[in-house]
Image: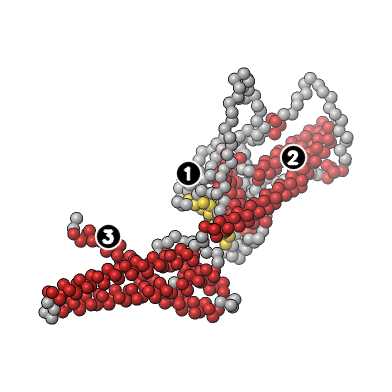
Amino acid sequence: MPPYARLRPLVRRAWNPLAAVTLGALSGAAEGLFLIVAGLVWVSPGRAVVAGHAREIAAWERRRLSLPPVHTPDERRVVAYLAARLWPAFLGTITVSLFLTGLVLVVIVVRAFATGQMGVLDLLGQALIGSALLALNIQAVGSVLRLDRWLAHRLLETGSRDALEQRITELTATRAGVMAAVDAERRRIERDLHDGLQQRLVALGMLLGRARRSRDADQAATLLAQAHDDAQRALDELREVAWRVYPSALDHGTLDDALTMVAQRSAVPVRIAYRLDERPPPQVETVLYFVACEAITNAAKHSGATVIDIEIDASATEFEMHIRDDGQGGADPTGSGLQGLSRRVAALDGHFTLHSPTGGGTTIQVTLPQAPTTPPPSHPAPHPPPAAAPQPAATSRPTPYPTTPPQPTPAAGPVPHTIPATPLPPAATPGPAIQSQPPAPTQPAAASPTATTPGPAAHTRPTQATPGLSPGGEG
């Protein structure tokens, strides 16, 4: 190793603090001018603009000091930090000026020795004095840098008590938001059951009643065929309502599989880029699923988009999802659907961002931390049954909703796959004959040896579960 190579770490360690103090001295002059302008417009409507620029300057100062970024909610503390920074900036200016003066004196001494105007003893004396002054200057640089960092910690970062109070406030707000979102979802499900599925079942009962009283075999067969179609549509609607409560496909497949099934029912083509190497926690997958479904539904109903792009990625600390469409934009962030999604994301300490300018499409960005604060529900380990108690067979308990077999997980990569749009089946409308004749009073059916009791198999779920457009309502 060359001798000068060993000096590189020492030079770098000495140069980085000096460069930070020098930049701090220069930025202090600019911040002084900024504070003068801020004092003139602070009481005017430009206060928000001043506060925004003050936060940007404070963020730059933290990067200069190699400190992690923080968010300070109080704008007055940010402005107070910029004012307090004038003192270390002034000290830094003096320190850097002394260092530059020392360099000039070194050049003068070396030149005098080279021209013979200074002897060896005088050179050694000047070198001894210069070394002592350089050591003091280096100590001053370190002290100024520590003072600058102390001010950044003290004024921009919240203390333990302030952080605890802020955290309690955030948890209270998110809890209230989640409760409001749950109540809104319950009302939406009740409305779907009452206005959709209940009406269809009433019409189905009337059709079966007419077929039962009909004396014409052909007419009875026609009514039974129509009743069978209505029963299938009722099953589809019931399955969609169940998926709005919780997508069971996430229990047996990945988020990519569940979104692919949703995209197949979308009226707008959807391109999905799933780049996660490992599965996120269940609560994270659920939130991302509901956000994607709501965005697909809104784009299909209101935006007039021709394609929807969904990108799901992960960094070292958080999960990210970007949803873009090329529609007309203008989405209302205060809508009930988008507000409910924002509350869901906030419940996991995430961030929900909506950008929808008129005529510029809509972009939704969701970021969720890798380790959400809401832990998954824990179940206690079951106690072993007594030895004398007989164990039931594994197949003795019928399953009313058989699980969907897991589908192959697509390989993660940046290449998106496009799911073309498929038309939705038209809803059957009961004809006038359904309402023209009231249903006959039902008589209890006589028990017979050959009659079968409808059990859980009557609600058997199809093998290929297909969710609806969205778990939410209009945005």
Q: Secondary structure at mark 1?
A: loop
Whether tag 3 and tag 2 are in contact, CB under 8 A, the answer is: no
- The structure residue drawn at horizontal position 22% and vertical position 58%, both measured from the top left corner, is 6
Look at discs 2 and 1 and give the one toward the viewer: 1
Is 330 placed above or below 263 here? below
Q: CA separation, marks 3 and 1?
A: 39 Å
Q: Secondary structure at mark 3?
A: helix
- Specify the amino acid type for callout 1: Glu
Task: Give the crowd class for mark 1: few <14, some 14-19, many >=20 residues within 10 Å.
Answer: few
Whether tag 3 and tag 1 are in contact, CB under 8 A, the answer is: no
Residue 36: horizontal and vertical position, in percent?
Answer: 49, 79
Which label is found at residue 9?
3
Is 253 placed above or below 59 here? above
**Foreground of the two, 328 or 75:** 75
- Specify the amino acid type for callout 2: Asp
* Residue 23 found in image quarter: bottom left
Q: CA separation, marks 3 and 2?
A: 79 Å
Which label is found at residue 230?
2
> Quadrant of the image for the N terminus?
bottom left
> Quadrant of the image for the C terminus?
bottom right
Left or right position of 310 against 60: right
- Specify the amino acid type for callout 3: Pro
Which label is found at residue 278?
1
